Amino acid sequence: MPFAEITGHEQSIALLQAAWRHGRLAHAYLFYGETSIGKLMTAVKLAQALNCEQPVQTDAQDSCGRCRSCLQIAARTHPDYFVIEPDREAATPQIKIEQVREIEQHFVYRPLLGERKICLIDDADRLTIGAANALLKTLEEPPGDSLFILVTSRLHALPITIRSRCQALRFTTPARTQVEAALILKRELPPADARFLAVFADGRIGAALTMTVADVRTRQQECLALVKPESLMSSATILSTAESLAKTDRGEETLAWLARWIRDLVIILVEGDHDQILHLDQLPDLRRYAQRADTDALLTLLTDIERTQQQATRHLNVQMALETTFLRLREALGLIPAGAVT
Ligand SMILES: [Zn+2]
């Protein structure tokens, strides 16, 4: 499929096309940036473009998306195209040395069908030390007609030796409006749902395209029910809610939803950009909460939730974090006087 189907990343694509047009494509690229924003998709489309048998325009540096080569690359069955990735089901996903060795053997020979052999390494930060060293040797003396594309969302975790052998290309998160437009176009979502998913996914187009609207809306309703005054008034209710959420394994997710809701409220309180509000359909309710809410207390709570979220999962006492959040939230919302016991 052609590059035009990618949401955002116009600059990265233009850079790659210009390099190709001038015969200056590097032997190894490193695509890095946030998860789920289109790095891998761009890599696949570059592979298709480079080996396309029927380019729409011969000088367009783009693919047709329909020819045998394009289809084979999409299906990962093209004889000159290889993908290495970690076993994501594993407890510790890794790219092993055997996987790199296997590629090396393929790259000894000239391309079978296309112009060049292409190896795509997804989540390249998962290379074991052995695998990274093996790959390094190949990157130091790349076969003439080869292209390696490494993709990572954890640049710091990739050995500096590997990074220094690649031309790095930073992928920025697409704008929310771009994600929204893509959702309307590709998933034919109603504008309100498209906007909601786009804000919720925070620019992660890959996630936004695969989320189920009904699921996300259900979570939203659950979150809204939790912050209702009647849910927060009684300490006993708070304790039992926190306990049952922690038991169902949804505690961390709930914390994230609470943080988003609090952030919306803060945006209203500080008269920030409404465009950033997730629960825009709740604006009248949010304004009502804002009338009695304490901005400072909410901001401190928000910072503390974010700090909690950054803790390693195994150290996090979700039940306690939820209890504390609810108890502090009801004070910050002015539902009960600070320090009062109910
Ligand atoms: Zn094609």
Image (cartoon, rainbow, N blue to C red):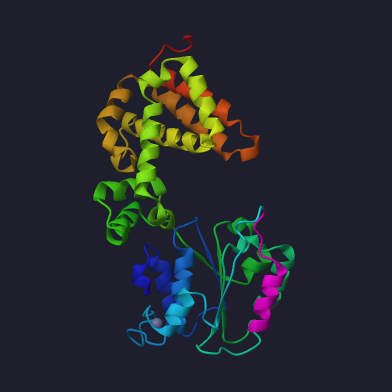
Asked if residue 131 lies in the magenta stretch, the reply is no
Which portion, as a residue range, is magenta?
A: 92-106
Position in image of residue 324 (x %, y %): 53, 23
Q: Quadrant of residue 249?
A: top right
- Above or below residue 9? Residue 285 is above
- Above or below residue 329? Residue 111 is below
Task: Point out the image quarter for the N terminus.
Answer: bottom left
Asked if residue 32 can be seen in this view, the reply is: yes
Residue 328 in the figure: left or right of residue 84? left
Query: Which residue is drawn at the image coordinates 61% and 34% (left, top)?
Result: 316
Position in image of residue 320 (x %, y %): 57, 26
Depth check, front residue: 90 or 63: 90
Residue at the limit of the structure toward the top, as seen here: 341
Asked if residue 140 can be seen in this view, the reply is: no
Residue 36 in the figure: left or right of residue 127? left
Position in image of residue 149 (x %, y %): 55, 72
Query: Which residue is drawn at the image coordinates 50% and 88% (left, top)?
Result: 115
